[in-house]
């Protein structure tokens, strides 16, 4: 995720970056420019269609369709941003939940319980790390210290890793309760924090596994393409050959909005505008370490 100063105007907004849509759309924009130029030449020099009355009807159609397509693109962008922001809120809840979990444990653990402190200092952040890897659909590579913690041997990479980490944390809490370190009140509070981990995971999976319906997304793409392809037909006699750069710019704006929506609707990936999951995991590890 890019970190920038939103109050400046000239340090990044006019510079191409890895996330800039112009890089991705450049081939199709060149094709649209050539198409508009060729079509303009044929209409003006070869077919001489300027006297046809149906050209005015096409202009009226584009005026109406322009309003409709603007509503669709705005709705598409807002829907994608809502998914991005919901993902950020869920990971913000994970940060707070990890801190609360560590604070409640630190309040009941004595200095003689250093083994438990080391365990939770390592494996509360492990839940965030495993959730990140799970959401990014990468192969899970966890360093299992089997000698120090034999219970970690039950982790299986082909199964739901966050659930397994949450189960290990729950088993450790239960062990503390059996040893008399935790009271019934402590168990209730800690179980609420453990349940919240699974709730956060489920919310993230809902965003990850439920994309925008394909028919809706494909319809917007087709609508934009048809609109752009037919745009120079009517406006070439008003703008002349200037219709080529104008239509190319309109295609860039509409296509960029769709590409941005596609990128942020899955906020857990590795794109430049996705959530900084690794940084959040590092912060959780730092804060939990400070508390415990």
Image (cartoon, grey):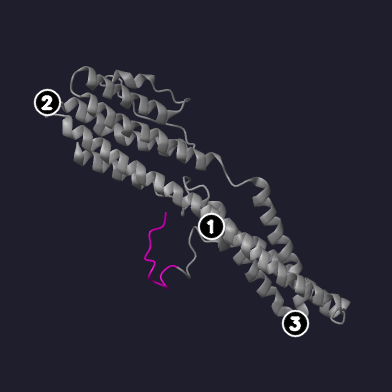
Q: Is residue 133 left or right of residue 103?
A: right
The disc, 1 or 2, on the residue closer to the chain's N-terminal end is 1
Residue ID at (28%, 31%): 190
User: Can you identify the residue that label 2 sits on?
Assistant: 112
Give the residue drawn at x 21%, y 30%. 118
Q: Which residues are magenta?
A: 1-12
Q: Is residue 110 above or below residue 75?
A: above
Q: Nearer the viewer, residue 233 or 32?
A: 233
Whichever of callouts 2 and 3 sits on the residue coming sooner in the sequence is 2
SS of the residue under disc 3: helix
Question: Which quarter of the rendered picture does the N terminus lie within?
Answer: bottom left
Q: Which residue is mark 3?
A: 238
At label 3, counting other C-alpha atoms closer than 10 Å, the crowd grade (few under 14, some 14-19, many 20 or more) is: few
- Viewer-closest of 287 and 106: 106
The answer to whether the residues at label 2 and label 3 have Cβ atoms under 8 Å apart is no
Q: Is residue 134 visible?
A: yes
Q: CA distance from mark 1 to mark 2?
A: 53 Å
Q: Residue at label 1? A: 78
Question: Of tags 1 and 2, which is closer to the observer?
Answer: 1
Please indicate whether residue 36 sits to the left or right of residue 2 in the image.
right
- Is the residue 219 above or below the residue 187 in the image? below
């Amino acid at each position: 995720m890019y970190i920038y100063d939103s109050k400046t105007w000239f340090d990044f907004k006019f510079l191409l970056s890895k996330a800039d849509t112009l890089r991705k759309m450049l081939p199709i924009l060149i094709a649209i420019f050539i198409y508009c130029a060729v079509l303009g030449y044929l209409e003006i020099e070869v077919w001489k269609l300027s006297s046809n009355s149906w050209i005015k009807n096409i202009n009226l159609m584009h005026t109406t369709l322009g309003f409709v397509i603007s509503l669709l693109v705005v709705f598409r962008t807002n829907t994608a941003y809502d998914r991005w922001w919901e993902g950020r809120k869920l990971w913000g809840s994970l940060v707070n939940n990890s801190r609360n979990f560590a604070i409640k444990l630190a309040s009941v653990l004595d200095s003689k319980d250093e083994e438990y402190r080391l365990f939770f200092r390592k494996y509360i952040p492990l839940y965030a790390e495993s959730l990140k890897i799970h959401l990014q659909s990468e192969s899970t590579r966890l360093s299992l210290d089997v000698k120090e913690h034999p219970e970690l041997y039950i982790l299986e990479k082909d199964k739901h890793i966050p659930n397994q980490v949450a189960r290990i944390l729950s088993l450790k809490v239960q062990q503390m309760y059996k040893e008399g370190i935790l009271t019934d009140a402590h168990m209730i509070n800690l179980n609420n924090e453990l349940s919240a981990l699974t709730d956060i995971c489920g919310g993230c999976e809902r965003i990850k596994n439920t994309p925008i319906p394909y028919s809706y997304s494909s319809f917007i793409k087709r609508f934009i393409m048809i609109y752009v392809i037919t745009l120079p037909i009517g406006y070439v006699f008003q703008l002349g050959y200037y219709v080529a750069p104008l239509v190319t710019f309109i295609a860039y704006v509409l296509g960029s909005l769709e590409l941005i929506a596609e990128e942020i609707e899955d906020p857990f990936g590795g794109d430049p505008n996705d959530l900084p999951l690794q940084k959040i995991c590092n912060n959780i590890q730092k804060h939990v370490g400070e508390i415990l």
